Image (spheres, helix red, strand yellow):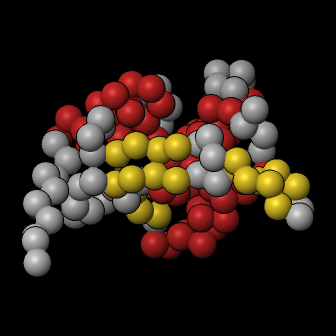
Amino acid sequence: MTQEPEQPPLTDVQLDILRRFALFEVSRDDMLQALAGAFDINFDPKEETSKGITQRRSANNRFPIPEPGIVITREHISNALEHKRFGLVSERDLVYWATILLLNDAYVFDPGDEDLIAEWLNDISFNLDAN
């Protein structure tokens, strides 16, 4: 039996970039570049089903879950919606942002609002148009 090599933890710089990404202070491309080898996400796979074409999103987290995690709060959602309302980000950017927050293991939802935050992020991720 071979043992998998231990995955290196995220650096302080990478964690800072993830914090800033959650606030729309760092672009998706810059965040992905900074986390190259530790995190990647694929938005492309499309699958045709009896209900139509669906998009399957997948991510690879190659790092131990940080303790503490980066806490996502209602304020993050509010900030994201304000960015969209003022035209600072596109609907596609908002979809990608929400999907990354859902799939990146460094993020955790505020325990007091966990269900609400998860519901909002899921609604943004799956019900808005990323095209």
Q: Is residue 22 left or right of residue 119?
A: left
Q: Is residue 63 left or right of residue 102?
A: left
Q: In the image as oriented, which residue stretches furthest toward the bottom? A: 1
Residue projecting furthest to the front: 1
Does the image show residue 36?
yes
Q: 120 above or below 34? A: below
Percent position of residue 73, x then y? 50, 56
Left or right relative to 82: residue 113? left
Q: Quadrant of the N terminus?
A: bottom left
Q: Is residue 81 above or below residue 83?
A: below
Q: Is residue 123 left or right of residue 68?
A: right
The image position of residue 19, as x and y in percent, is 36, 41
Q: Residue at x 38, y 33 (%)?
A: 32
The residue positioned 52% from the left and 53% from the top of the image is 58
Q: Residue at x 44, y 26 (%)?
A: 29
Q: Quadrant of the C terminus?
A: top right
